[in-house]
Image: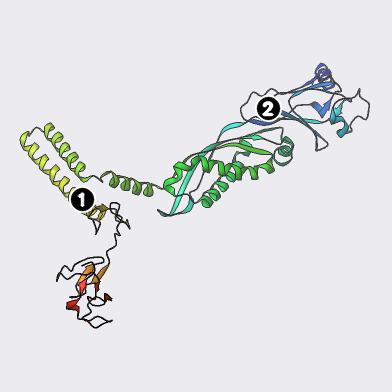
Amino acid sequence: MGIWDKVKEEALNQFIEVIEWLDESKDTILYRFPVHGQEIKNGAQLIVRESQAAVFVFEGQVADVFGPGKYTIDGGNTPILTKLGAWKYGFNSPFKSEVYFVNTKQFTDMKWGTSNPIMLRDNDFGIVRLRAFGAYSMRVADPSTFIKEVAGTNAHFDTEDIDVQLKRAIVTEFSDALGEMKIPALDLAAQYKEIGDAIRDKINIDFKDYGLEVTKFYVENVSLPKEVEEAMDKRASMGALGDAQRYAQFQAADAMRDAAQNEGGGAGLGAGLGAGFAVGNQMANAFGGQQGAASTVSCPSCGKANAPEARFCAECGGKMEVVKVPCVKCGAELREGAKFCSECGSTQEKQKCSNCQAEMAPGAKFCAECGTKVEEAAPEGE
């Protein structure tokens, strides 16, 4: 080094007038201001911009944190001087301190994802393996804690330096949240926002120890294994074929289209129509026969069609359950409430003794009160 270079360097060391940081990157979290020998001259100007914090570290300890604004480093109005106790030579001499600028803005579009599938128990598919990915935004909430716990003495610290650690914490909390919420795999897509909010709250409990805060958390996709997705596609296809009649029409229309494109003309048309109708009719019989038999149940009282699980008729309010009782005369099984036997035609209503008007038990041959024969008794209401 030449003599003039040395003189120039010493001059710069003694006349530091402005301490500031202009961030030209997009991912720098912390930057240590290059003070030669860590000497800061009394009267220097400290400029802290919006979304920044300046942290003074003296003898390995955080001395003070400055928010946005312009400050003069002197012995009268700077709180840092009372904490450092570094003015051994009076206010005309420099003091030694490290100055760190911390970027407190939100770092957006940070990616996360599961490197390995997450094993979960699902009511529809049993045990499934889920993969998920998304994005999140975070910022430094406590610059002092961040320097103590994460950055340390690094002169430059960006998002890549902590990205792996943050992803591990996110995946752990994501797995735990899914297990606690017990959302069926088929309903996950409708719960992305709720899942994201729940995971963000859990993550912030861990990130607080780093001086960080997750401001936004997004779940972009939760995917199932290929074989499970194929099973879901088949189930959806079967649901689309619920109307067998329309399926038959669709098959016939396809056959007509193919026949029209066939050079064989009429022969192709006849064969195509025959195949289309045959397949359509088979599908209609297969689906229609199974679905029609179990789709409705007739009311035993009024005959109105009701859903299979209905307990009372939607038309007359009668019970859908049929209770069988024996005929009072021939013993044939009858529906409860029947007035006459379908086998012998005998009335099923209670009778009264024609002599004493006492009620008689069904099938009784004599009145239990006066001994009058049943043949002489008359039905109630006559």
Between 348 and 110, the residue placed more toward the observer is: 348
- Residue 31 in the image, given as x and y percentages of width and height: 70, 30
- Residue 146 in the image, given as x and y percentages of width and height: 71, 38
**Image mark count:** 2
Establish if 136 lies above or below 308.
above
Contact between marks 1 and 2 (CB within 8 A): the answer is no
Establish if 182 lies above or below 92.
below
Residue 197 in the figure: left or right of residue 140: left
Classify mark 1: helix, strand or loop.
Answer: helix
Residue labelled with disc 2: 51
- Residue 105 in the image, given as x and y percentages of width and height: 65, 29
Residue located farthest toward the top when viewing the structure as drawn:
4
Residue labelled with disc 1: 288
Q: Earlier in the sequence, mark 1 or mark 2?
A: 2
The image quadrant of residue 256 is: top left
Residue 324 in the figure: left or right of residue 257: right
Q: State the mark number for residue 220.
A: none
Q: Residue at 35% across / 47% down in the picture?
A: 232
Characterize the local packing of mark 2: few (<14), some (14-19) or many (20 or more) Cα atoms within 10 angstroms.
some
Characterize the local packing of mark 1: few (<14), some (14-19) or many (20 or more) Cα atoms within 10 angstroms.
some
The image quadrant of residue 261 is: top left
Q: Quadrant of the N terminus?
A: top right
